Image (cartoon, rainbow, N blue to C red):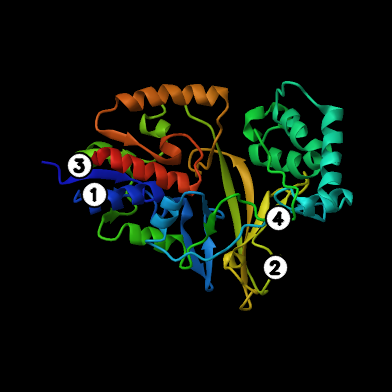
Amino acid sequence: MPQYDYLIVGAGLFGAVFARQMTDAGKRCLVVERRGHIAGNVYTEDVAGIAVHRYGAHIFHTNSKAVWDYVNRFAVFNRYTNSPVANYKGELYALPFNMNTFNRMWGVVTPDEAAAKIAEQRAAHYTETPQNLEEQAINLVGTDIYEKLVKHYTEKQWGRPCTELPAFIIRRLPVRFTFDNNYFDALYQGIPVDGYTALVQKLLDGVEVRLDTDYLADKAALDALAGKTVYTGPIDAYFGYSLGALQYRSVRFETELLDTPNYQGNAVINYTDADTPYTRIIEHKHFVFGSTAPGTQTVISREYSAEWQPGAEPYYPVNDGANSALYARYKALADAAPRVIFGGRLGEYKYYDMDKVIEQALACAAAQLS
């Protein structure tokens, strides 16, 4: 007889929430994790008393009261509000695009003036059926915002010219005719006071977890331990890349501990020019709400976008036509796999915000218990 009801591959948010739900329902769960730590890409670690987001900034935001109430069972959240800044060759602009942005860009002071400026630029370059990201972006926000705040940042992110990127990547761009620098249009927002690692630790309380365990290297033996497997790793890796490798964008981080209390004055600054090789700099201590840069040191991370290669961490699925078609073929294999549930960003080859990952995990667990 299997020792466990569920083998859960991956100790990130999807795996941890699923394990919590099934454990509370009396099921026996084993979580295995390839890395030497829990929490997946939301892992935070203490560096000189600063909670550092090792795999990039994660700000929790949701419009779902059910999800917000759920995560608050396991963590106390601060009221951090994400208000990034764009740096274009030394010119600083508020994000998302709002009246502060438009005043800095054009000197306009009223919403009508800003709307008229955008409408003028749209009309001069309007494309009835946008064939690429550049045409779509100009249709939405005009040429000035596109050239300074969208084009080069996007090309660094994706490693491709905007004229070669599909229009659907930016079906819409947030444009606000108010002086509102809050990036997310969400009712609930914040970061766990004790970090995401502590949140995931509480989700996994009472669950057996084996770290430094490569599931794919010992798949048959691990599968034999449980009645069902929940797999949250890359779907193409599960099937040995038998149909070919799906494409991802990856991110490389350069993290430094600096002997200054305040490096840039904001948690996130995007670099939207072509000459700066990184996409943004994160200053981790500013994720603490109300921080006035206490202490004498700070930690910053420069982010460099890169094409995914074996051995690197896959971050963003490249959901173009070719990759979507390839994923559909892997999805057919997954649907036919006995006793295996595929979930999460890598298992479903889909970018998920954290709240959507939690929603999916809760729904998956409920389906298993129904």
Label 4 – label 3 distance at C-alpha: 50 Å
- Among all residues in the image, which is located at the extreme bottom? 295
- Tell me the residue that label 1 is attached to: 29
Q: Residue at x 44, y 23 (%)?
A: 328
**Disc assigned to residue 263:** 2
- Mark 1: which amino acid? Cys
- Element assignment for label 3: strand
Can residue 33 be seen?
A: no
**Of the residues under marks 4 and 2, which one precedes in the sequence?**
4
Picture quadrant of residue 295: bottom right
- Residue 223: x %, y % from top left: 23, 39
Element at label 2: loop
Residue 226 bears which disc, if any? 3
Q: What's the distance in space between the residues labelled 3 and 2, CA to CA?
A: 49 Å
Residue 219 sits in quarter: top left
Mark 1 neighbour density, 10 Å: few (under 14) some (14–19) many (20 or more) = many
Q: Name the residue type under label 4.
A: Asp
Q: Where is residue 333 drawn, in percent x and y?
A: 35, 24
**CA distance for labels 2 and 1:** 44 Å
Residue designated by label 4: 180
Q: Amino acid at mark 3?
A: Ala
Cβ atoms under marks 1 and 4 closer than 8 Å: no
The answer to whether mark 4 and mark 2 are in CB contact below 8 A is: no
Mark 4 or mark 3: whose residue is earlier in sequence: 4
Distance Cα–Cα, label 1 vs label 4: 45 Å
Question: Few, some or many C-alpha atoms within 10 Å of disc 3 (few <14, some 14-19, many ≥20)?
Answer: many
Q: Which callout, 2 or 1, points at the residue further toward the start of the chain? A: 1
